[in-house]
Image (spheres, coloured by chain):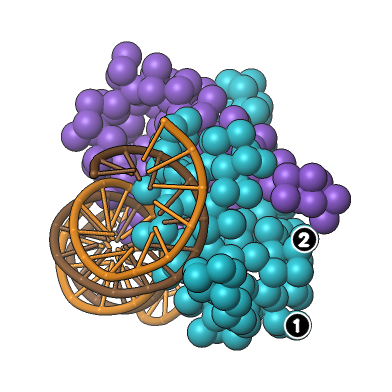
Chain colours: A purple, B cyan, C brown, D orange
DNA sequence: TTTTATACATCTAGTTCTTATGTATAAGAT
DNA sequence: ATCTTATACATAAGAACTAGATGTATAAAA
């Protein structure tokens, strides 16, 4: 799965690409496994990206021209580093802004009280 | 679609059930069309539930025992009112709490700076 | 009389995610 | 020495969900 432990998985659908883009926008480049580890670390284990979701998403973002890749051999292991393209960088900003706005909107629902709802009824 | 205008649709997948449960937890009962209108009103048009997503979701929640229905005839029109069951009520609280927590976690990613990321690298 | 609003609902196609599986290297534990 | 865990990539089948279209029907407004 793409989120495990603490959250119902459904909650997070659709946020994966935004998370990837944001992570890459704060770093020169990262490779897949590194992304999973950093996200886990930053969120204290609450969000775990899974390979089954992560790699297809990375490939799609690359196919869409938002990411470029560069393979680097470290020891005997090959790492595939992803970094934002120019388009990817502006797209990252857009998607993050969109997510922020959406969370604000969600709050208006989450903080709803019977009184507030009655007003609108 | 289930969200239109302002938000990329992907972002919101998985929040529909939580939204429905929260809306119903602040009201005795509501019917489908009313839900779409109230959510649109409260979010100032930013979130629009669509029938194609709403009705299947309502039916699933009912099948899962979280909602009960009661048909009422108003004029010549039949409305199907949904209300929370006992299980649905506690589930609503759980899902809302989960969403709040998740939004906090998302913030740690969204508010990430190169410095903070560097710390963790 | 035509359009818009109300009110239910379903269906196809598309996308996404989960879970499982597969390959391979390397480090640490037994 | 050998087994397990961590690192590192990836795919594939099936499940789940949503968008967008379509369908039925009443009623109000233009």
**Residue B94 seen:** no
Viewed as shown, does residue A2 lie left or right of B109? left
Judging from the image, mark 1 belongs to the subunit labelled B
> Of the numbered discs in the image, which one, if any, rests on residue B86?
1
**Residue B84 seen:** yes
Q: Nearer the viewer, residue A89 or B26?
A: B26
Quadrant including the N terminus of chain A:
bottom left
Is residue A86 depicted above or below A110 in this figure?
A: above
Question: Residue B40 appears at what percent x and percent y?
Answer: 57, 43
Question: Residue A9 appears at what percent x and percent y?
Answer: 52, 63
> Of the numbered discs in the image, which one, if any, rests on residue B101?
none
Mark 2 or mark 1: which is in front? 2
Q: Element under label 2? A: loop
Judging from the image, mark 2 belongs to the subunit labelled B
Q: For mark 2, does the 10 Å Cα neighbourhood hold few (<14), some (14 to 19), or many (20 or more) residues?
A: some
Q: Element under label 1? A: helix
Viewed as shown, does residue B69 lie left or right of B23? left
Counting every numbered tag in the picture gives 2
Q: Nearer the viewer, residue B82 or C20?
A: B82
Viewed as shown, does residue A5 lie left or right of B2? right
What residue is at 61 percent from the left and 73 percent from the top? Answer: B81
Separation (CA) of disc 2 from disc 1? 14 Å
Q: Nearer the viewer, residue A6 or B3?
A: B3
Marks 2/1 in contact by CB < 8 Å: the verdict is no
What residue is at 69 percent from the left and 75 percent from the top? Answer: B84
User: Which residue in the protein does label 2 denote?
Assistant: B26
Q: Earlier in the sequence, mark 2 or mark 1?
A: 2
Is residue B97 depicted above or below A44 in this figure?
A: below
Do the residues marked 2 and 1 share a common chain?
Answer: yes
Q: Residue furthest right?
A: A115
């Amino acid at each position: 799965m793409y989120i495990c432990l603490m959250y119902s998985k459904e909650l997070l659908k659709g946020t994966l690409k935004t998370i990837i883009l944001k992570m890459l926008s704060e770093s020169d480049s990262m490779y897949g496994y590194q992304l999973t580890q950093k996200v886990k670390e930053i969120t204290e284990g609450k969000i775990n990206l899974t390979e089954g979701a992560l790699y297809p998403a990375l490939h799609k973002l690359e196919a869409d021209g938002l990411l470029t890749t560069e393979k680097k051999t470290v020891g005997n292991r090959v790492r595939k580093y992803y970094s934002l393209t120019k388009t990817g960088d502006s797209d990252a900003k857009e998607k993050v802004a969109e997510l922020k706005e959406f969370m604000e909107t969600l709050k208006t629902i989450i903080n709803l009280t019977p009184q507030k709802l009655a007003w609108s009824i």
